Image (spheres, rainbow, N blue to C red):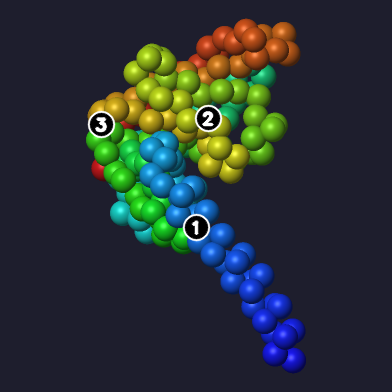
Amino acid sequence: MKTVLKILIIPIALVLAYLIFNQYIINTYDGRLCVSPSIEMSKKNNLYLGVYKPLKDSVSLKDKKIKAVEIWTEKRWRDGHTGLFFREIYSEDGFNLIVPYKTNFDSVDYVVEPPDRNYISHMGGQPGLGFVYSYSENLDTIKLYIQQRKNDSWEESMNVDSINYIKAY
């Protein structure tokens, strides 16, 4: 019985030692920009700033109108890991702007873009979250363009509408 126990304990101990050592090396501060997956998580981590309200009710696409939604913001932050299950949040100047949408990301036939792409860092469309941008400074108003593709290809797109937002926090 003791031999069987030793045979099981030694591999388990080696696997645990490897996992702890591996996590210690891999999980160091990686410095990438991150975004919270929800307003609730943003509030929980003390990152949530507030909302920007649209100055019009709807946005016109080529073939339909969609309701203009509030966009929310949080402090700009980076993620870092220093241990096996320990996560740190490093907030910095600027903010993340999240433009939510209600449909599945694969079925979205429009893109929301700021007017000056050099001014922001685009963090991509996040399924279930929306279009995400990271601005380096806080703004009172934001203008976003709604783009749709030409001829069933995203290689060419055109602005079909725009919407102005005003800070409400």
Nearest the eye: 92 or 31: 31
Mark 3, other Cα within 10 Å: few <14 / some 14–19 / many ≥20: some
Q: Secondary structure at mark 1?
A: helix
Q: Which residue is at a point 64% across and 74% down the rendered structure image?
A: 10
Q: Percent position (x, y) of residue 54?
A: 40, 32
Distance (Cα) linking label 3 and label 1: 41 Å
Q: Percent position (x, y) of residue 169?
A: 26, 42
Q: Which residue is mark 3?
A: 138
Q: Which residue is at a point 65% across and 14% down the rendered structure image?
A: 154
Image height check: is 167 above or below 90?
above
Q: Which residue is mark 2?
A: 124
Mark 2, other Cα within 10 Å: few <14 / some 14–19 / many ≥20: few
Contact between labelled residues 3 and 2, with CB atoms less than 8 Å apart: no
Mark 2 vs mark 1: in front: 1
Check the picture and name the quadrant holding the N terminus. Answer: bottom right
Q: Residue furthest bottom?
A: 1
Mark 3 vs mark 1: in front: 1
Direction from residue 123 to residue 48 in the image, left or right: left
Q: Percent position (x, y) of residue 72?
A: 39, 41
Q: Residue furthest front?
A: 3
- Amino acid type at mark 3: Asn
Q: Secondary structure at mark 3?
A: loop
